[in-house]
Image (cartoon, rainbow, N blue to C red):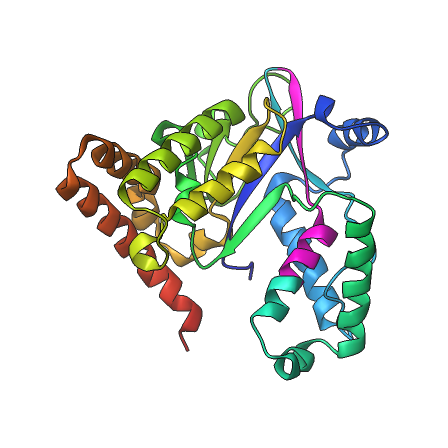
Amino acid sequence: MLPYAAYLRVYEPLTAFPEPERTLWTAYADSRRRPRRIHALRAEHREAALRLAAFPPEPVPERESRNAYVRRSADMIYVCPWETRLRSWLAFDRFQATLPAGVAEAFVPRAVAEHAEQEFGRWKAAGRSLRPHILSSTWHVPLAWFAAFGRTERCLLLGEPPRAERKSATCFGENPGRGPATAAVTRTLIYVTAMPEARRRVAAALRIVRDNLGEGTGETTALAAGHVEALGRWLDGFHPRALVELDYGGLVHLLDDLTLRADDSVGELEVALEAMERGEAELAVAMYKRLLARWRPVRALESAN
């Protein structure tokens, strides 16, 4: 059972990586032994489960992952490193911040937590990047993430396509030739866009949200300016020719086929923002409420028995 999480990923062109990383990722992209996209989430989850099930648990791996997601488009190779160690440090920091010290120690012994903190401190002291290529969100997709995409950039697969249709299923970009790859057995909903488009859309959304919703927080302002601004800053840290991907990840297993086909969260947010800009408050509120109503039942499952 995979985590009920969605992912926002940035794939950078090989030219964005310094040597020797560039050479390593080039060889990796052509390797037959690397986890293919449809197996990547399962492979990463298995590694994490084995670490956490150990005694004592290992919240952060001792070495950084050498795996990555790979896309090919227009004869270019794009790479999104897993960066499991960095993401684990950041997630462990958030985990500890949400619990009293005594409760946190029930999950991870203090000595193990202190070791992870010391290692992370050395990482930061060395001036290493704290900007992962992958953001994750459990039990929902943050509304700000939808702002980076257009409704025509959507790709939905609900299982293995019929043989006659496999060559036209172009979602994953792992084929060695031109264009995206043939889809394999999977169930997924993703959006992919170019970095310039993502930045333009997020900047426009930020301006509209600031003018109409201010800087508030909470569910009534789930698209608060701070959320959109943070997304914009994250995107600005990557190569201008990168690709941006929204992956519903494990959330697709909480939604039936009919619900996934009907999901138009990106389009509804787009309509809501356009209505705000035109001063059509009723339409903007209607679209906004529709978005919240769609995701509220999914988020509620986090506390279901």
Q: Is residue 141 magenta?
A: no
Q: Nearer the viewer, residue 49 or 222?
A: 222
Identify the image quadrant of the C terminus: bottom left
Task: Please tell me whether residue 116 is drawn above or below residue 125 in the rendered image.
Answer: below
Residue 224 on image: x %, y %: 37, 49
At x 27% / y 41%, what residue is drawn?
Answer: 212
Describe residue 78's horizontal placement relative to residue 9 as left or right: right
Residue 158: horizontal and vertical position, in percent? Answer: 42, 43
Front residue (pair 138, 230):
230
Is 87 in front, or is 131?
131
Q: Which residue: 42% across, 50% down?
A: 142
Q: Quadrant of the N terminus?
A: bottom right
Residue lying at 36% horizontally and 34% vertically, measured from the top left = 207
The residue range painted magenta reads 75-92
Q: Residue at x 56, y 58 (%)?
A: 2
Q: Image quadrant of residue 297?
A: bottom left
Quadrant hosting residue 210: top left
